[in-house]
Amino acid sequence: MSDRNTDWNYHPDLPLEPVPYWAWPPRPRALAAWVLENFLSASDRVVYILFALAVGLWIQPVTPDQASLQPGWILAALLRNYIALLIVAGGLHIWFYGYDAQGNVLRFDQRPITGRKNALFKFSDQTKDNMFYALASGAPIATLWEVAARLGYANDILTTISFSAHPIWFLALFPILTLWQGLHFYFVHRALHHPPIYRHIHSVHHRNVNVGPWSGMSMHPVEHLLYFSSLLIFLVLPSHPLHMIFLLYWQLLGAPSGHSGYEAVWIKDKRRLFVGGFFHQLHHRYYECNYGSPEIPFDKWFGTFHDGSDSATKRTRARKREMHR
């Protein structure tokens, strides 16, 4: 591990580098290695693709009865999203913080996410507060967006493609959608950091300076509405319901895994499942940096990229002072 930063219990090699989609001159080997690691090996992305396949092909595919609003299929979608969130956020929380199954191995910040009562949070408890927002607002609003998309597919408002007719495009859409989500998230997130909006809406999420899995979906309802509005892309993007479900899960479930506070699930002296995002962990500690995702280099282009180094911390703190004068 290079350039050790003692502010953290653990961090990946520093300085962080943008995903090699945008490298110039192109680095095809590096890009192929990154795609292999994130989409064809044990990572949370692969899990959510498998979830999407299970839901879209077996558990609850889009069917003609979804052309109209019926309580049965809507409640089934809501229940399924609750179960998925409980499995991912709840499971990761129990593994990392309930059983403390791997201690501080691959943990970014070793400070506890719970402990003494804190009046900043509902119920004076960070985890209970985070669960409240995730379950009372996050899953229901995600389901509203999913219901709207299912109505669109069932009524032929959204253009549906098949794997047999467009196999390359069908497969390419999965990484393309993560790029789209990064682009969408950057601009929504920057708007949420506008002081009045931050104060009344985004501050709910940022009470979590040291994050855990339930922190990912701990947002004000207005932020949930904006966050899941990424599904509007399907109004113009030919796709299959599998792609919609993947994008939904990449956000609903990817936020808990990306806020887990750990880089990976560690079992028997080996990384078994990559989950954590140090890039976004830096945002929660330093706020005015890393607004987007590593896959879209807007932060690098617009001067808000924190690469984990001490010099980047100094630049970010100086920028914060200028912003709040």
Image: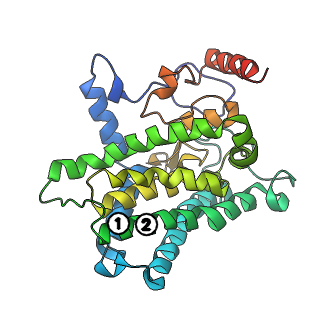
Secondary structure of residue under mark 1? helix
- In the drawing, does residue 42 fall left or right of residue 112? left
- In the drawing, does residue 307 fall left or right of residue 166? right
In the rendered view, tell whether residue 321 sits above or below residue 35. Answer: above
Residue appearing at x 42%, y 54% in the figure: 231
* Image location of residue 227, percent across then percent down: 54, 50
Label total for image: 2
Q: Amino acid at mark 2?
A: Ala
Can residue 237 be seen at all in this image of the molecule?
A: yes
In the rendered view, tell whether residue 282 sits above or below residue 225. Answer: above
* Image location of residue 88, percent across then percent down: 53, 61
* Image colouring: rainbow
Residue appearing at x 72%, y 49% in the figure: 204
Can residue 213 be seen at all in this image of the molecule?
A: no
Secondary structure of residue under mark 2? helix
Judging by the rendered image, the residue that carries numbered circle 2 is 148
Mark number, residue 17: none
Callout 1 crowding tier (Cα within 10 Å): few <14, some 14–19, many ≥20:
many
* Image location of residue 41, percent across then percent down: 33, 47
In the rendered view, tell whether residue 261 sits above or below residue 14. Answer: below
Q: Nearer the viewer, residue 276 or 175?
A: 175
Give the quadrant of the C terminus: top right
Q: Assess whether mark 2 and mark 1 are in contact (beta carbons under 8 angstroms).
A: yes
Q: Amino acid at mark 1?
A: Gly
Spatial CA span between label 1 and label 2: 6 Å
Judging by the rendered image, the residue that carries numbered circle 1 is 152
Question: Which image quadrant is residue 141 in?
Answer: bottom right
- In the drawing, does residue 127 fall left or right of residue 121? left
